[in-house]
Amino acid sequence: MKYIVNTTWKHENEIDWNKMEEAMATLRREGQPSEEVYWYEIDSYTHGAVSIFPSEESYKSHIAKLTKMRETSSKNMKIQMDFEAHGPALVTLTASE
């Protein structure tokens, strides 16, 4: 069963989406178990993130690395997570259904 992680992040400065794209490229290079990651604008100082993992086990196996990555990015990008929720995707609708 897919496992969803949803977070929101406050930025000290206005969001620079070019820097955000660079950060996403780093995630791609380093590899991670999530199947999809979406970053979206809430306002010019806040972004949201949705990550889709293949299972809760894959998320849990990655949590130590994810926590360290979050600590580093928070410091380097001057951002702070202000919300996190996660859980199993119990009901879904996809384009292929």
Image (cartoon, rainbow, N blue to C red):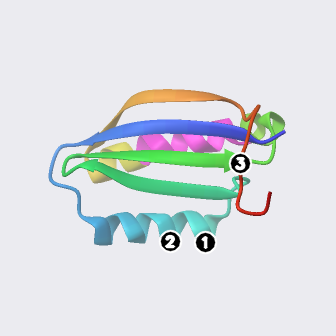
Q: Mark 1 falls on what kind of element? A: helix
- How far apart marks 2 and 1 lie (CA) works out to 6 Å
The image shows residue 75, relative to residue 24, as above or below, that is above
Question: Which three-letter amino acid code belongs to the residue tagged 2?
Answer: Ala
The quadrant in which the N terminus is found is: top right
Q: Tell me whether the residue at label 2 lies in contact with that at label 1, contact meaning CB atoms closer than 8 angstroms.
A: yes
User: Which residue is label 2 attached to?
Assistant: 25
The percent position of residue 31, horizontal first and vertical second, equals: 67, 63
Q: Give the range drawn in magenta.
A: 62-72
Vertical placement of residue 81 versus 23, above or below: above
Image point (71%, 48%), residue name = 93
Q: Position of residue 40 (x, y in %)?
A: 39, 54
Helix, strand or loop at disc 3?
loop
77 or 7: nearer the viewer: 7
Report the number of discs. Answer: 3
89 left or right of 39? right
Q: Position of residue 30 (x, y in %)?
A: 62, 65
Residue 63 forms part of the magenta stretch: yes
Q: How far apart are marks 3 and 1 (CA)?
A: 29 Å
Q: Name the residue under label 1.
A: 29
Mark 3 or 1: in front is: 3
Amino acid on which the number 1 mark rests in the picture:
Arg
Between label 3 and label 2, give the one nearer the viewer.
3
Report the residue marked by disc 3: 93
Residue located 19% across and 52% down the image: 44
Q: Helix or strand or loop: what does disc 2 sit on?
A: helix
